[in-house]
Image (cartoon, rainbow, N blue to C red):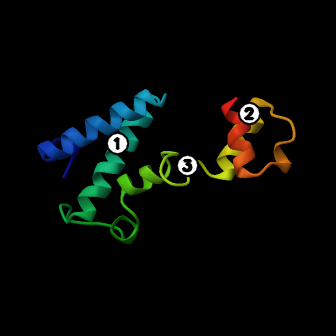
């Protein structure tokens, strides 16, 4: 199947993902690629495609993976993510800070 033969649901999903990627600052080409890959993976997971790779069917879903990267939920951002942000902002003493201290320093 080509993208033109996707169901209406998959077309909407494609447009939603593409718009989200564009909002995140991705180029048009990159946004289209990510959207198509996402839709194709979801089609493979739900049995809509004729062929599917093991990683498409056994890996976590795109929505679950995106949720883990959303920086919300019980743990929020990881210490590594917080450290990277602190480094970008030039916060001194960041290497000796705990996760909680990094969160506090970044919230100032």
Mark 2 or 3, nearer chain start:
3
- The nearer-to-camera label among 3 and 1 is 3
Comparing marks 2 and 1, which lies closer to the viewer? 2
Are there few (<14), some (14-19), or many (20+) residues within 10 Å of tag 3?
some
- How many neighbours does mark 1 have within 10 angstroms: few (below 14), some (14-19), or many (20 or more)? many
The picture places residue 67, in percent across and down from the top left corner, at 43, 51
Q: Which residue is mark 3?
A: 76
Placement of the C terminus among the 4 image quadrants: top right
Residue nearest the viewer, comparing 42 with 98: 98
Please give the residue where the numbered disc 1 appears in the rendered image.
Answer: 35
Q: Secondary structure at mark 1?
A: helix
- Name the secondary structure under disc 3: loop
Label 2: state its secondary structure.
helix
The residue that disc 2 covers is 88
Q: Is residue 72 above or below residue 49?
A: above
Report which quarter residue 107 is drawn in.
Answer: top right
Mark 2 or mark 3, whichever is nearer to me: 3
Which dot marks residue 95? none
Please give left or right for residue 86 compared with residue 67 in the image: right
């Amino acid at each position: 199947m080509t993208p033109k033969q996707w169901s209406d649901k998959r077309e909407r999903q494609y447009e939603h993902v593409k718009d989200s990627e564009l909002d995140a600052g991705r180029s048009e080409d990159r946004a289209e690629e990510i959207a198509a890959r996402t839709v194709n993976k979801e089609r493979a997971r739900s049995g809509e495609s004729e062929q599917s790779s093991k990683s498409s069917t056994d890996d976590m879903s795109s929505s679950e993976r995106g949720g883990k990267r959303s920086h919300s939920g019980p743990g929020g951002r990881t210490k590594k993510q917080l450290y990277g942000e602190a480094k970008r902002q030039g916060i001194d003493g960041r290497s000796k800070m705990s996760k909680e201290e990094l969160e506090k320093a970044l919230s100032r």
